[in-house]
Amino acid sequence: NAGVTQTPKFRVLKTGQSMTLLCAQDMNHEYMYWYRQDPGMGLRLIHYSVGEGTTAKGEVPDGYNVSRLKKQNFLLGLESAAPSQTSVYFCASSLRGGSGANVLTFGAGSRLTVL
Amino acid sequence: AQSVTQLGSHVSVSEGALVLLRCNYSSSVPPYLFWYVQYPNQGLQLLLKYTSAATLVKGINGFEAEFKKSETSFHLTKPSAHMSDAAEYFCAVTTTSGYSTLTFGKGTMLLVSP
């Protein structure tokens, strides 16, 4: 049972380069999320999806785009990376939202450094 | 809008001592509250959750938390700390609204000394 898998685990980019982080879940969860974690800031929600084909902005969406073409996958894209996007990115999924069932399952994280 | 405040970015205890990690929430509707733990270089794992069934919630690894509406608090406790409890702990809140997402606190790093 893989749970939530993120690729890649590590990546170094130069300013202005683009990249995509892939998140895959095998639990048939409806909701998927992308968070970033920075020291002293906790986890901040970037974008989320409440089902296949849907996306919504979170707390810090600027500079990122997402897509959810298949229920099991949630992609996070950086079109033109900036040093401020150096962070650890976590993908998570949940059966649904807004209830006690909203227990998130997290991936192991993707560490991105932008030079 | 909902928010969570965790008091103390770092808490240090000795092995065997009481662990108390503080969390206060703000929510305009009845909240659901969670504690997650993150071990070094790993993702977050659920410790326990409050969903209005009982105010005292027991979780994994001997942790428990008590929901106090009058104090808008959901503090995490453990009677006796183990070295293996050293990790970062996050309190989080969501609500009963349809598309409500989880809002996390900034985290508290628990340091356990022998």
Image (cartoon, coloured by chain):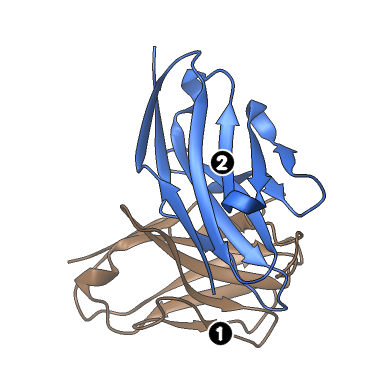
Chain colours: A brown, B blue
Q: Is residue A50 above or below residue B9?
A: below
Residue picked out by circle 2 = B75
Nearest the camera: A46 or A66? A46
The residue at 50%/31% (across/down) is: B20
In percent of width and height, residue B81 lies at: 52, 20
- Tell me residue A84's x, y (percent): 24, 70
Q: Work out which residue is located at the far front of the displayed protein and give it.
A: B70
Q: Chain of mark 1?
A: A
Residue linked to disc 1: A56
Residue B2 sits in quarter: bottom right
Left or right: A53 as drawn, with respect to B105: right
Q: Residues at marks 1 and 2, common chain?
A: no
Front residue of A5/A58: it is A58
Question: For this rendering, which residue is in front, A43 or B74?
Answer: B74
Residue farthest to the right, as pictured: B53
For residue B102, which numbered disc appears in the image?
A: none
Q: Is residue A53 above or below residue B5?
A: below
Residue depicted at 40% across the width and 76% down the height = A60
Local crowd at mark 2 within 10 Å, few (<14), some, or many (≥20)? some
Q: Residue sitting at 75 percent across and 54 percent down? A: B51
Q: Amino acid at mark 2?
A: His
Question: Is residue A40 among what the camera can see?
Answer: yes
Residue A14 in picture, x, y percent from top left: 20, 72
Q: Name the side, left or right, on which A26 lies relative to A109.
A: right
Neighbour tally class for label 1: few under 14, some 14-19, many 20 plus, Cα within 10 Å: some
Query: At label 1, which amino acid type do we have?
Result: Ala
Of all chains, the one bearing label 2 is B
